[in-house]
Image (tube, rainbow, N blue to C red):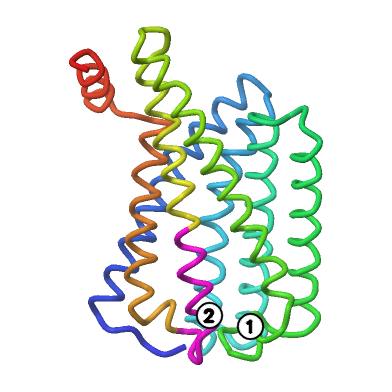
Amino acid sequence: MPEASLPITLLRMAGFVALAGAAIIVGGRMLRMWSRTRQLPELALGSHILILITGYSLEFTGLAGERALGPDAAFALRAAGNLAYALCIFAYLIFSWRVFRPQARWATLLVAVCTLGLMVGWTGELATGRFELVAERFARPWFWIAFVPRIVCMAWSAAEGMGRWRLLSRRVRIGLESPLLANRFLCWGLAALAEVMIYFVAGAALLGPRPTDFLVGPAALVISAMGVAASITITLAFTPPAFWQRWIESRAARA
């Protein structure tokens, strides 16, 4: 993997650190809630974000450390990282389904189709390649079979979050709903939208002549910025600090 310039390396690291912080804060809180409630949504959301950061760590270690680790160990890390991506998306699909559309047949079918795509894509990549950042990998269908469900999952979550925010905002204006709850759905929708943007930017870079550009080129800056944005908004959605809650409430009172 080619080396990135120092500014891009630092900015990319900032995105990863922000995401790791959000994973620990939000994921840890959700799993603590699950330990009390034993409800599936808390388990699914907490698992999603913690598995996601684990997948990043495994894959990037396998990409950057092949010389030190050896090709087989690096391949195993990349395969495990990509499996973690599939598992974290599956967890988020379950979360969106159980929270928003538990009775909808189309949602059940969407979860099933996306899960099948995640499984087939990862298995196909395992059988035909080594999860490397090379053009040959992205010329085959397997990566994209697993990649499209990631976009679908996060776009669905963004649509649900933003839709619920619009509904609650109208109720806030007439005093029938909490502004904090409405803002949480807004932040959650924005976090999912930022992840959608990450996938689109990464996908466009991976389709180019040099797939590594999404790590060392200008696309890395956009991805890092979206990672920071997602980390901030997901934290505000699920663990909003007191000053943020006061600001939201005072803003609603003045409206």
Q: Secondary structure at mark 1?
A: helix
In magenta, the rendered stretch is 197-212
**Left or right: 220 in relation to 36:** left
User: Looking at the picture, does residue 203 appear above or below residue 30?
Assistant: below
Which residue is at 53% across, 47% downward?
49
Instruction: Inspect the magenta stretch and tell me whether residue 228 lies in it.
Output: no
Q: CA distance from mark 2 to mark 1?
A: 7 Å
**Left or right: 78 in relation to 1:** right
Q: Which residue is mark 2?
A: 206
Residue furthest to the top: 175
Q: Which residue is mark 1?
A: 138
Q: Secondary structure at mark 2?
A: helix
Residue 181 position, x and y percent, is 42, 21
Instruction: Inspect the magenta stretch and tell me whether residue 199 lies in it.
Output: yes
Pick the residue in front: 208 or 241. Answer: 208
**Left or right: 129 in relation to 59:** right
